[in-house]
Amino acid sequence: MRLTVDHVTRYTYDPPARSVVQSHRLHPSDFAGQKVIDWQVTVTAGHRGAPHRDGAGDLVQGWTVAGPVTEVTVHVTGTVETTDLAGVLRGHRETVVPDCYLRETPATAADAALTALALRGAGNDTLSLAHSLSALVSDAVAYRPGVTHAHTTAAESLALAEGVCQDHAHVLIALARLRGIPARYVSGYLFADADGLAHEAAHAWAELFIPGLGWVGFDPANRCCPDARYIRLGSGLDAQDAAPIRGIARGIGRETMDVTVAIQQASQ
């Protein structure tokens, strides 16, 4: 499937910031399931730093914007050709050992309810257990935008029994780590045609490490493993760690952010 992306993130500062520094994970991952046809990231009045690839295999690009800064627009456009690998991250080069992703973070910290749900997972092998845990999350947390926020934890979203893709991913990561399965958060995009389920075009899911297969994606929000509709950007321990855009503004002003994302299927 050939997918086009038009992703605009606009930051405004009042009063103007003295300067803005950002770190981007906005370039699609390099693996057997996707091939970049063309890709461009622009930043209003931005100065591009030297890119590097981190231990998780993600391309990281730094940007600086000299002040005074009233507005910064990050515009991502491009085309990616994707292949359905049943969620398996095949051919992805990275150096971080999987057991690093057993580490708990504030967003994925376990409580009694998460522990009880994790113990309900069943399976004769790790892959079966992973599918079971993902299904438990789909049943326990209904998709409902607006009830959670960027800093909602896995425990909080499970208690609400509602949330969005970020919450589904955090809950699944927490359950997997409780059962001894390395798990990480993945940011990216999701295309759905007229028959697709409701979703956010800027999407998130989890990857669990399965012996013999490697990293395998699970998307409890849509009750599936990532397929050709998904574009993978990057990964981390949780949403904050895997954020496509991270940054800091120097100054005392208030920052507001507006995001629009459009994903379309392109003709071959």
Image: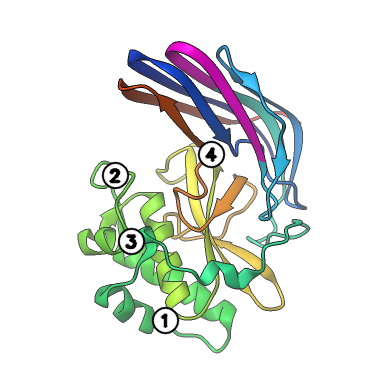
Q: Quadrant of residue 92?
A: bottom right
Could you say which is closer to the camera, residue 206 or residue 199?
206
Tell me the residue that label 3 is attached to.
154
Residue located farthest toward the bottom when viewing the structure as drawn: 124
The first of marks 4 and 3 along the sequence is: 3
Badge 1: residue crowd in 10 Å (few <14, some 14–19, many ≥20): some
Residue 150 visible, this orientation: yes
The first of marks 2 and 1 along the sequence is: 1
Q: Disc 4 residue type?
A: Pro
Q: Disc 3 residue type?
A: Ala
The first of marks 3 and 1 along the sequence is: 1
Q: Residue 248 vs residue 49: left or right?
A: left
The image shows residue 200 at horizontal and vertical percentages of 43, 40
User: Quadrant of the image for the N terminus?
Assistant: top right
Q: Which mark is residue 121?
A: 1
Could you say which is closer to the camera, residue 83 or residue 145?
145
Tell me the residue that label 4 is attached to.
244
> Spatial distance from mark 4 to mark 3, Cα to Cα?
20 Å
Q: Disc 2 residue type?
A: His
Instruction: Label 2, secondary structure: give it.
Output: loop
The image shows residue 221 at horizontal and vertical percentages of 42, 55
Q: Main secondary structure of the magenta part?
A: strand
What residue span does the magenta drawing correspond to? Answer: 60-74
Q: Nearer the viewer, mark 4 or mark 1?
A: 4
